[in-house]
């Protein structure tokens, strides 16, 4: 065979694998997240349809803008509030607000987290700032050196404490594994079954 024909055949055979690794279109990632939300928190689509629809889009857009893995941002919303944009916790001193349970300790970086905490776009912008802060920290590099699977997620719960909450790391790790399996099934056209 001629070299040109061989090259064409190699390209055709490599195309499906390359397409599978390519970044997903935003609408596919958002639709996937909505289907997970419907399984994890089925009442949200009825009680707060705006949150159930807007949160996935905000996650895709802000993750791209901030060069973050959308799946990790999505898992944080799952872990922290079961995707509830109106979640509030008063267990922490000063409280924690929104789908990412952002605490007032972050006020100097993101502004007052109590202001419009229920707004999906604003909540994702705020959590992206917090994650970028951690990503640029020495603590993140330390966890990477120590081979933590999801160092950014582990730091999110640790706050400014030096020690990492290993139980939290394990929980978000399991959720990340579940999302990764389900995302693979979704992209292959199979039904997804999310597990906690």
Image: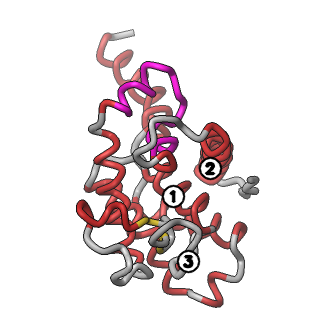
Q: Mark 3, residues whose alpha carbon is within 10 Å: few (<14), some, or many (≥20)?
A: some
**Residue carrying label 3:** 87
Residue 52 place in picture, x, y as percent:
55, 78
The kind of secondary structure element at disc 1 is: helix
Pick whichever, 67 or 163, lies toward us: 163
**Residue shown at 70%/83% (left/top)?**
43
Image quadrant in which you'd find residue 54:
bottom left
Pick whichever, 149 or 5, lies toward us: 149
**Residue 151 on the magenta segment:** yes
Q: Considering only vertical position in the picture, is 89 above or below 171?
A: below
Give left or right: position of 121 versus 88.
left
Per the rendered image, the range of residues in magenta is 139-155
**Residue shown at 72%/68% (left/top)?**
39
Residues tagged 3 and 2 counted as in contact (Cβ below 8 A): no
**Residue carrying label 2:** 179
Give left or right: position of 188 versus 62.
right
Residue 194 place in picture, x, y as percent:
72, 56
Q: Considering only vertical position in the picture, is 190 above or below 49?
A: above
């Amino acid at each position: 065979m001629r070299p040109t024909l061989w090259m064409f055949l190699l390209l055709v055979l490599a195309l499906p694998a390359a397409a599978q690794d390519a970044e997903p279109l935003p609408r596919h990632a958002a639709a996937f997240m909505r289907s997970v939300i419907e399984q994890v928190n089925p009442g949200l689509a009825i009680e707060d349809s705006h949150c159930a629809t807007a949160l996935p889009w905000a996650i895709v857009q802000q993750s791209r803008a901030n060069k973050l893995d959308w799946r990790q941002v999505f898992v944080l919303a799952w872990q922290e509030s079961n995707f509830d944009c109106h979640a509030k916790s008063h267990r922490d001193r000063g409280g924690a607000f929104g789908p990412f349970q952002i605490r007032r300790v972050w006020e100097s970086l993101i502004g007052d987290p109590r202001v419009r905490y229920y707004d999906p776009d604003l909540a994702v912008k705020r959590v992206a700032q917090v994650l970028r802060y951690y990503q640029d920290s020495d603590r993140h590099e330390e966890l990477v050196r120590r081979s933590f699977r999801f160092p950014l997620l582990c730091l999110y719960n640790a706050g400014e404490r030096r020690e990492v909450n290993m139980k939290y790391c394990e929980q978000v790790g399991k959720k990340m594994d579940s999302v990764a399996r389900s995302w693979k099934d979704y992209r292959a056209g199979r039904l997804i079954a999310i597990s906690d």
